[in-house]
Image (cartoon, rainbow, N blue to C red):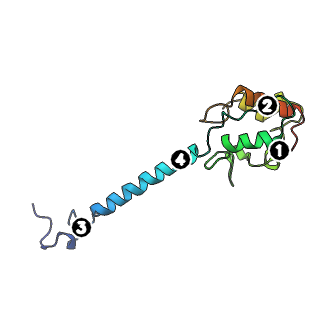
C-alpha cells in the first residue's frame, strides 16, 4: 500500500511520517519531563527532616521553635500552607497569618485550638498531610505554647 507519491515522505500531507517529531526532539522532551519530575521531588526533600526539631517543655518561643517547625514541616518549597492559595486557606508562614482566623489558635486552650486538634489527630485529616506526623515532643510543645498564651515571642 502506497500512502504518498512524492519521493520525499515528509512533503505529502497524508504521509504517516509527515507530522511525526524527530527522535532528537522526543529525547529532549523526555529529558525535560524527567528533570521536571525530579525537581518536584527534590523540592520536598530540600525542606529537610523536621522530626529532629525538639521543643522545650516550657517557655516555648513562637519565633525560636514553632515557626522553624512550621517552615520545615508545612511551608517549605511546595508545602501546603504557604503561598497565595494555602491549603484550607491557612497560611503558616507567619504568626500574623496563623492567627488571623478565629479558632486556629485559642490562647490558653490547646484542646479548643484547631491547630492542636489537627496535629494530634483528634480532627482528621491529621497534619501534616502525606508527611510523617509531628513527634510527641513537637505535639506537646505546640500544646504548651498555646497553653502559655500562643503569643508571638
Say which label, 2 or 3, has the lower sequence index: 3
Give percent across and percent down for residue 13: 23, 70
Task: Return the mark for residue 99.
Answer: 1
Q: Nearer the viewer, residue 6 or 132?
A: 132
**10 Å crowding of disc 3: few (<14), some (14-19), many (20+):** few
Q: Nearer the viewer, mark 2 or mark 1?
A: 2
**In the image, which is nearer the foreground, mark 3 or mark 1?**
1
Q: Position of residue 46 (x, y in %)?
A: 58, 46
Q: Residues within 10 Å of mark 1 (few under 14, many from 20)?
A: some
Observer-nearest of 140 and 2: 140
- The answer to which of 11 and 57 lies nearer the viewer is 57
Q: Position of residue 129 (x, y in %)?
A: 63, 36
Return the x and y of residue 12 as percentages of the image width and height: 20, 72
N-term mark: 4 or 1 = 4
Proximity of marks 3 and 1: CB atoms separated by less than 8 Å: no
Q: Which mark is residue 42?
A: 4
Q: CA distance from mark 2 to mark 4?
A: 29 Å
Q: Which residue is mark 3?
A: 18
Question: For the residue labelled by badge 1, is the local secondary structure a helix, a strand or a loop?
Answer: helix
Q: Estimate the spatial distance between the alpha carbons at disc 2 and disc 1, rounded to whole Å.
A: 18 Å
Which is more N-terminal, label 4 or label 3? 3
Residue at 88% in and 41% down? 151
Earlier in the chain: of badge 2 and badge 1, it is 1
In the rendered image, the vertical position of residue 139 relative to residue 74, given as above or below: above
Judge from the rendering whether residue 40 lies leftward or rightward of residue 82; answer left or right. left
Mark 2 lies on residue? 141
> Which mark sits nearer the N-terminus, 2 or 4?
4
**In the image, 109: left or right of 41?**
right
- Estimate the spatial distance between the alpha carbons at disc 3 and disc 4, rounded to whole Å: 39 Å
Amino acid at each position: 500500500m502506497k500512502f504518498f507519491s512524492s519521493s520525499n515522505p515528509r512533503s505529502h500531507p497524508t504521509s504517516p511520517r509527515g507530522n511525526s517529531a524527530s527522535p532528537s526532539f522526543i529525547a529532549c522532551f523526555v529529558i525535560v519531563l524527567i528533570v521536571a519530575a525530579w525537581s518536584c521531588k527534590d523540592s520536598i526533600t530540600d525542606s529537610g527532616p523536621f522530626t529532629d526539631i525538639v521543643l522545650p517543655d516550657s517557655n516555648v518561643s513562637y519565633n525560636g521553635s514553632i515557626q522553624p517547625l512550621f517552615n520545615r514541616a508545612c511551608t517549605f518549597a511546595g508545602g501546603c500552607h504557604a503561598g497565595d492559595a494555602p491549603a484550607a486557606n491557612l497560611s503558616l508562614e507567619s504568626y500574623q497569618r496563623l492567627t488571623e482566623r478565629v479558632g486556629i489558635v485559642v490562647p490558653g486552650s490547646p484542646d479548643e485550638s484547631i491547630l492542636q486538634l489537627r496535629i494530634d489527630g483528634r480532627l482528621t485529616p491529621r497534619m501534616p498531610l502525606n508527611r510523617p506526623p509531628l513527634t510527641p515532643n513537637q505535639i506537646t510543645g505546640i500544646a504548651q505554647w498555646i497553653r502559655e498564651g500562643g503569643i508571638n515571642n
